[in-house]
Image (spheres, helix red, strand yellow):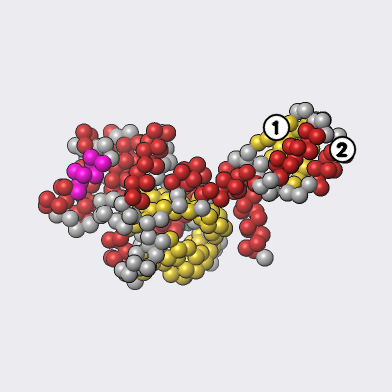
């Protein structure tokens, strides 16, 4: 592969499900474009049904696109499936993909054999992965007796068995406890230090901020924005809201006229909530309330769901124009 090729290049990628005579068509991916340079950790952040898993499945050749193109490590996911499979390791969260009646070691041996490893090379790779993921002591136990966190670690080991240049992690921390989730973040940093490209799907904005070089916000099969995580922080501060009690009507009017104020809602019986939509708006609202002598004031950062709603709403309108 020439070094200039991105690790992942997706152009006008489209995937629908259903749409037969009686079934409504679902658009899982709506003509998306995405370019991820080699060595980047890229987050796909979005609500349920956004299309994240569909994209991972297409990139790992498990699913065919309806239209458009995708390449991994310079190889086309439709025409060069064998080469793509050699380049990609995929890790799904949850229970999928492990043979629970086999031991941890047997699971890894099975996958290593599928990647063409044999004999000494195979056992060295498997030993190294068991060690890396803290499973050496339990290697000869059946997976059905493993805790959820141990299964997750085995999933990660499995994803790396073929020494892939590109690692697709689909909700890998679902169900992990905070310590395991912390270890996972270290692992992603290690993968990057090893020069691998990582595509990580998650619902968790904090996780995305902690490990990703860039994040794409996905909803309804579209990529609404691709930004560096620091920009996600400004999205959050941009959508802060301020609540206050016993605000005189004239001050409410002044608040409505402030730049960056999106709405002022009455919250019965005696409160108002001011929603902002610009970075400096919340401090300006606070100043105005304090200057007006309003004492009972509080601010709230929006939840992740609020940020989705605001950003998706804003960009959605622009996309739909
Ligand atoms: N095999 C399928 N048959 C029919 N519809 C499907 C199929 N797979 C996915 N879809 C639909 O495509 C859309 C995108 O699903 P996808 O699983 O890619 O979303 P996601 O972002 O991974 O969501 P989640 O976070 O819930 O895993 C959804 O509307 C889903 O119902």
Which residue extends farthest right?
Answer: 250
Whether residue 64 appears in this view of the structure is no
Q: Closest to the observer: 216 or 101? A: 216
Q: What kind of element bears circle 1?
A: strand
Picture coordinates of residue 246 (x, y %)? 82, 30
Which residue extends farthest left?
Answer: 119
Residue position for label 2: 249
Q: What kind of element bears circle 2?
A: helix
Reply above or below: 63 against 107. Answer: below
Picture coordinates of residue 10 (x, y %)? 45, 65
Examine the structure image and report whether residue 135 is included in the region drawn in magenta. Answer: no
- Residue at 39%, 65% (x, y): give it: 6
Quadrant of image for the C terminus: bottom right
* Mark 2 neighbour density, 10 Å: few (under 14) some (14–19) many (20 or more): few
Picture coordinates of residue 210 (x, y %)? 46, 43
Q: Closest to the observer: 161 or 47? A: 161
- Residue at 81%, 47% (x, y): give it: 257
Image position of 59 (left or right of 46): left
Q: Alpha-carbon distance for marks 1 and 2?
A: 19 Å
Residue 180 occupies quadrant: top left
Examine the structure image and report whether residue 128 is included in the region drawn in magenta. Answer: yes
Picture coordinates of residue 280 (x, y %)? 69, 46
Q: Which residues are magenta?
A: 125-132
* Mark 1 neighbour density, 10 Å: few (under 14) some (14–19) many (20 or more): few
Residue position for label 1: 298
Dominant secondary structure, magenta: helix
């Amino acid at each position: 592969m020439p070094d200039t090729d991105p690790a992942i290049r997706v152009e006008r990628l489209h995937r629908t499900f259903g749409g037969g005579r009686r079934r409504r068509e679902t658009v899982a991916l709506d003509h998306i474009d995405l370019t991820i340079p080699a060595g980047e950790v890229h987050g796909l952040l979005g609500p349920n049904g956004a299309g994240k898993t569909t994209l991972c499945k297409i990139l790992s050749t498990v699913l065919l696109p309806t239209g458009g193109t995708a390449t991994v490590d310079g190889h086309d996911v439709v025409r060069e499936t064998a080469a793509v499979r050699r380049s990609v390791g995929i890790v799904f969260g949850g229970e999928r993909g492990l043979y629970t009646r086999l031991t941890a070691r047997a699971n890894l041996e099975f996958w290593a054999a599928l990647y063409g490893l044999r004999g000494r090379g195979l056992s060295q790779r498997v030993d190294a992965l068991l060690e890396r993921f803290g499973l050496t002591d339990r290697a000869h136990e059946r997976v059905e007796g493993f805790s959820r966190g141990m299964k997750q670690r085995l999933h990660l080991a499995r994803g790396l068995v073929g020494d892939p240049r590109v690692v697709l992690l689909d909700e890998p921390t679902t169900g992990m406890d905070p310590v395991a989730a912390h270890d996972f973040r270290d692992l992603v940093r290690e993968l990057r230090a090893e020069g691998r490209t990582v595509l990580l799907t998650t619902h968790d904005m904090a996780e995305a901020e902690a490990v990703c070089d860039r994040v794409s916000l996905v909803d309804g099969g579209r990529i609404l924005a691709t930004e560096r995580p620091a920009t996600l922080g400004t999205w959050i501060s941009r959508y802060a809201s301020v609540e206050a009690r016993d605000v005189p009507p004239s001050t409410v009017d002044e608040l409505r006229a402030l730049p960056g104020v999106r709405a002022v809602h009455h919250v019965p019986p005696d409160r108002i909530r001011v929603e902002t939509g610009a970075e400096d708006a919340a401090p300006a609202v606070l100043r105005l309330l304090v200057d007006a002598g309003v004492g009972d004031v509080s601010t709230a950062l929006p939840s992740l769901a609020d940020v989705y709603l605001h950003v998706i709403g804003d960009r959605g309108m622009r996309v739909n124009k």
